[in-house]
Image (spheres, rainbow, N blue to C red):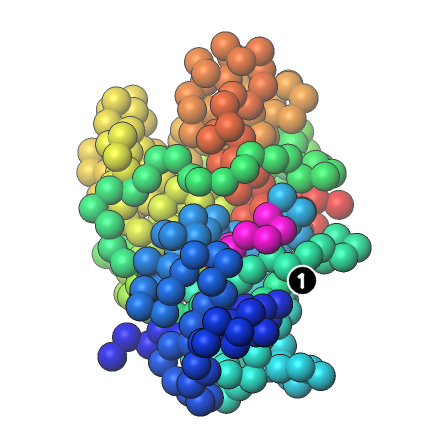
Amino acid sequence: MNKIVFAALLAVPALAHAQGASMPPTGARAIELAPRIGLSVADDYETQRAKARAPRFDSEAELRDQSRLYVGRIVELRGTVKGTFSRSEGFALMLQQPDGTLLVESTNAFRGHALLKAGTFVRALCRVESVDGGEPNLSLAGVTDRAEPLALLKADDDDGIAIAPPSVSAPSPDAILLGPEVDLPPAPGTDGATDLPTPRVQSMAAFKPASSTNPYFGFTEQHRANYRVFIRRANPKISEESAHQIAGAILTAAQTHNLDPRFLCAVVQVESTFDPTCLSSSGAMGLGQLMPFNLKPLGVKNAWDPQDNLLGSAKLLRQNLNTYSQQKDGTLLAVAAYHAGVGAVNRAGMKVPKATTQRYVWKVYYAYRALAPELFN
């Protein structure tokens, strides 16, 4: 049976009661949502999400920076339940994000529910009630432990507001391009492939290696295991075997083209959520969402093969970083060019063009910042 539960929004229990809403006991499969957001108990989670037009936030920092624009709206969060603790009215859920933990308030109707046990990966619909001192106050509106349904075509345009973070300090291209001064072991290849030698390509400036304690900076089997866990946390639909292959492909492609693997990983997370079969409505294919006209110039023979696709994606990112290395906000322009093309960025006067590309750039920004926080100081 589909494990889907809906909770009354914290701010309107009296309204629901006044309209005759019956409240099932704790552990019930469905609890009526607030009438003021136009959702009903008859709808499943996906229908509720579609009706609310809930934008998805993938990190605590992204939600915190943009939450003021979504007060009174439903947003979708994804993460692992760390636990719950009692409040004066109801309880609070601790939801682990890649870069921190979010607190989500709930009524007692959810207390003790199986979906909210520690260690469970969930997708949660949350209402942004208010923002105090930059911190969003969230209330639980719906939750499921099921992965997002497969769709034949991935939508190209994300529904949401394009806005830059309040303070942008993205690392320069020089900090992402790894050169010969970085002594790292060879990247593990995907199963059945031989390890590639450590590339020796000159970078544009001396690279300061990230903290040795960062679990995602490096090319050893332990780093591969860390990426495998990260991939499955971001997309539970991906099997252990596939996640292992994708993790190896990320490390091999990044090292082949002298990229910080965390940068490549962030782009892939935003592009396809690590789904190697992802196909967009415009024809972009695979993990890195490569367009058909880019395959031959990038040397990609099979866009559905994780290693082949990511070698092409890393090559394109490397080219873009080289192109904009001398520009202010060169890294952001390189990401924009990956999404919209170099021509679009140049025609926009060396700025990030159109709202959809702006939102894409900030998605990658937050994903990379979560993986490499020490580069954003």
- Is disc 1 placed on a helix, strand or loop? strand
Q: Residue at x 57, y 74 (%)?
A: 13
Quarter residue 242 falls in: bottom left
Q: Front-most of 174 and 278?
A: 278
Which residues are the magenta region? 70-78
Residue 309 x, y percent position in the rendering: 30, 40
Number of numbered labels in the structure image: 1
Q: Residue at x 50, y 82 (%)?
A: 110
**Image height of 9 relative to 281, above or below:** below
Q: Is residue 162 visible?
A: yes
Q: Front-most of 350 and 106?
A: 106
Q: Front-most of 174 and 1?
A: 1
State yes or no: residue 216 in magenta.
no
Residue 353 x, y percent position in the rendering: 51, 21
Residue 198 x, y percent position in the rendering: 46, 43
Q: In the image, is 66 to the left or to the right of 280?
A: right
The quadrant in which the N terminus is found is: bottom left
Q: In the image, is 345 to the left or to the right of 373?
A: left
Instruction: Report which residue position mark 1 lands on.
Output: 137
How packed mark 1 is, by other alpha carbons closer than 10 Å (few <14, some 14-19, many 20 or more), is some
Q: Is residue 80 visible?
A: no
**Image height of 48 relative to 67, above or below:** below
The quadrant in which the C terminus is found is: top right
Quarter residue 308 falls in: top left
**Image height of 200 relative to 35, above or below:** above
Q: Residue at x 36, y 46 (%)?
A: 272
Residue 71 x, y percent position in the rendering: 62, 51
Quarter residue 206 falls in: top right
Q: Amino acid at mark 1?
A: Asn
